[in-house]
Amino acid sequence: MPSLGADMEAGTLLEWRVQPGDTVHRGDIVAVVDTEKSTIEVEVFEDGVVEALLVEPGTEAPVGAPLARIAAVAPAAPAAAARPTRAVAAGRKRAARPRKAKAKPAARPGTAEPAPTVAPVAAHLRASPLARRRAAERGIDLAAVAGSGPGGAVVAADLDRATVVPAPAAPEAAVPGPPGRREDRQAAMRRAIGALMARSAREIPHYHLATTIDMATALAWLAETNEQRSVSERLLPGALLLKATALAAREVPALNGFWDGSYRPSPAVHLGVAVSLRGGGLIAPAIHDADRLTLDELMAALRDLVGRARAGRLRSSEMSDPTLTVTNLGDQGVDEVHGVIYPPQVALVGFGRVAERPWACGGMLGVRPTVRATLAADHRATDGMIGARLLNAIDRLLQHPEDL
């Protein structure tokens, strides 16, 4: 069970996306896990062959508990040496097939009868919790869906391939709902957020800095650039703020990393983006290598990440490795936000709304669009001078938006 955040202690396995004998590659989705904050797709981080699934769907497992056993793929070798490897893999697949066949005898007698009553009930019961929920939302009769999960269980992926068959009224009412902890996800999320923020405030010696950034040049460049684009391709000011923060974090690595007894800088800039969920609550998945993305790529990544976060389709890597978090409440009319650091990170950058304010420029007093930028940083890792360098770098970068 992967750790999907400092506040996670356990997760519930909802469904498997693989079966014994399947070959998996780095980045493949192998399972779906439910946490107090969201439903997360778990990736595999090495190539191999699935030997065994150790946890049944619907089971809660603590962080670090083995979920499956994966055998490493043998390195490329001469043809004579490669044959045993293929034979072993083929043997595993053949060994997996009888187990699938044994899982279906309960339904097989029903094929000889015109209208068996036991088979639909058995098929209905063999479904992952996520499949049950999605079937109820889409009005699909689980009894009419062929399952590809362990023991012939219906998993969520089967519903995407199935023809929509309306569920009968009576069985639909009898469909067991998700576990109680999922029905009260909001309360669980508030508890998790509260516990993590209490830990952060208790253990991390915060210091806070703030500055006001002139956005006139950046917004003028943005307006000129967007005039030449279709509506779907236009950039938002938030993309400029994120890219400037990512480049500043690369420039000031002392604030881009983790504290685990001592400071450990990260070689990559994975920006955690605070996303408010529609039903309430907060989640901060990562945009990977944000400093290396173009503004268009960053804008696309931001739209994709926010959409999947609110749909409960985030990946485990997006939850486990943010190196610096950015929160932006400008769209809510907030002038500035003073955040709390998300451990084990050592800094959080906040942005308020872009608003017209009195501003002295070139010896003249006028009105210009500005934004308040704030920084919360860990005094164990840095001091205020380092934090000031980060905010100054963000300011400087935003004065040259064409170079972002």
Image: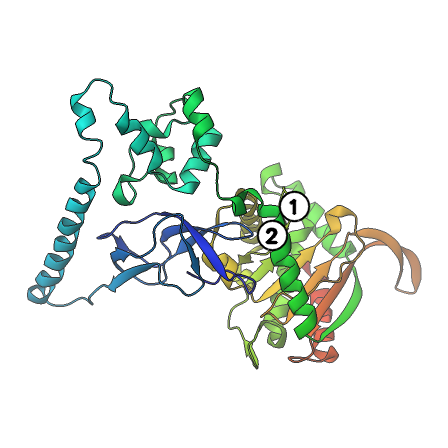
244 vs 230, nearest the viewer: 244
Mark 2 Cα shell of 10 Å, populated few (<14), some (14-19), many (≥20):
some
Which image quarter is the C terminus in? bottom right
234 vs 199, nearest the viewer: 199
Q: Which mark is residue 126?
A: none
Q: Amino acid at mark 2?
A: Met
**Residue in the picture at 39% in, 63% down:** 65
**Residue in the picture at 32% in, 38% down:** 126
How many labels sit on residues?
A: 2
Instruction: Residue 181 in the image: state x and y as whole percent.
Output: 53, 47
Instruction: Please state if 233 lies on the left or on the right of 129 as rendered.
Output: right
Instruction: Please state if 124 lies on the left or on the right of 6 as rendered.
Output: left
Mark 1 Cα shell of 10 Å, populated few (<14), some (14-19), many (≥20):
few
Closer to the N terminus: mark 1 or mark 2?
2
Asked whether disc 1 touches disc 2, contact meaning CB atoms under 8 Å apart, the reply is yes
Q: Which mark is residue 189?
A: 2
Instruction: Residue 334 in the image: state x and y as whole percent.
Output: 79, 52
Instruction: Please state if 390 lies on the left or on the right of 355 as rendered.
Output: left
Q: Which residue is mark 1?
A: 280
Q: Of the residues tagged 1 and 2, which is closer to the observer? A: 2
Q: Amino acid at mark 1?
A: Gly
Q: Quadrant of residue 125?
A: top left
Quick check: 383 above or below 188? below
Quick check: 93 above or below 255? above
Q: Is disc 1 placed on a helix, strand or loop?
A: loop
Q: Is disc 2 placed on a helix, strand or loop?
A: helix
